[in-house]
Amino acid sequence: MLHFSANSLAALKERARQELLAAGDTAGAGALTRFQALTSLVWRCFTRARRLAPDQETVCYAAADNRGRLRPPLPAEYFGNSISAIRTEAVLASELLARGHGWAAAAVGRAVAAHTDASIRARAVAWAANPALYAAGSFPTNCVLMGSSPRFDMYGCDFGWGKALAARSGMANKMDGKVSLYPGRDGGFDVEVSMLPEYMAALEQDEEFWAAVSRDAVPPGMKE
């Protein structure tokens, strides 16, 4: 479990924005979000930690909520999930690292922007024609999956014990390359990282990654 403060996320976003402006991508720079900036960091640093071959392709996936994207949107009373796994374009590992933080953030943004009412409905039609069940064990080992959301109200439910110290998800639905995002108590993001031990050891040595992590936000009484 790692924490990225609001200031850290703002710095990641600004760094990506400056890189995109320097590359002439004003549209990408203007549409940047904190989610894109953090996902770019994770995708690139995971790729480096895994030591993927330069000519090996990698993709970043993200779980996207369809409720507000459908036209008309699903009502607030809708019971159940309506989620799709969106993905960036495939890119060679060497190119992902060489193109930089801004390019990766914009690639995530393009995937989000393309997830529209039309694409959601087209996916539903395609699935109905050829239904298949998702298996966690089939997730590609050269990719990253961003799940959950920092928009979820993880601290608003009070059972009489006071405001929760932190959000945790347990052992379910974990695989190499899975990242789960939660709202931080201070306006930042709490990030749950799942990687194989050898990759995690390499990530622990990644200076770019740890320069963005806010190490002093562990709630009282809890261990990293």
Image: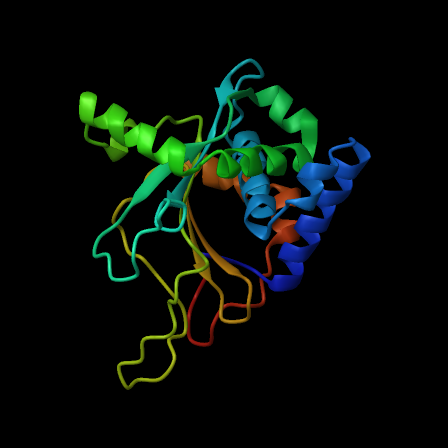
Residue 73 coordinates in the image, percent (x, y): 35, 50
Nearest the viewer among 139 and 123 is 123
Quadrant location of residue 164?
Answer: bottom left
Residue 104 coordinates in the image, percent (x, y): 61, 34
Residue 157 coordinates in the image, percent (x, y): 32, 75
Q: Quadrant of the N terminus?
A: bottom left
Residue occupying image coordinates x 26% and y 24%? 126
Residue 214 coordinates in the image, percent (x, y): 60, 60
Residue occupying image coordinates x 73% and y 33%? 25
View extreme (front): residue: 72
Residue occupying image coordinates x 66% and y 32%? 103
Residue 103 is at least partly visible in this image: yes
Quadrant location of residue 91?
Answer: top right
Residue occupying image coordinates x 51% and y 24%? 89
Nearest the viewer among 117 and 134 is 117
Visual colour scheme: rainbow
View extreme (top): residue: 55
Residue 202 is at least partly visible in this image: no
Count every numbered label the image shows and give the total. 0
Q: Is residue 129 above or below residue 157?
A: above
Q: Is residue 14 above or below residue 214?
A: above
Q: Is residue 186 above or below residue 115?
A: below
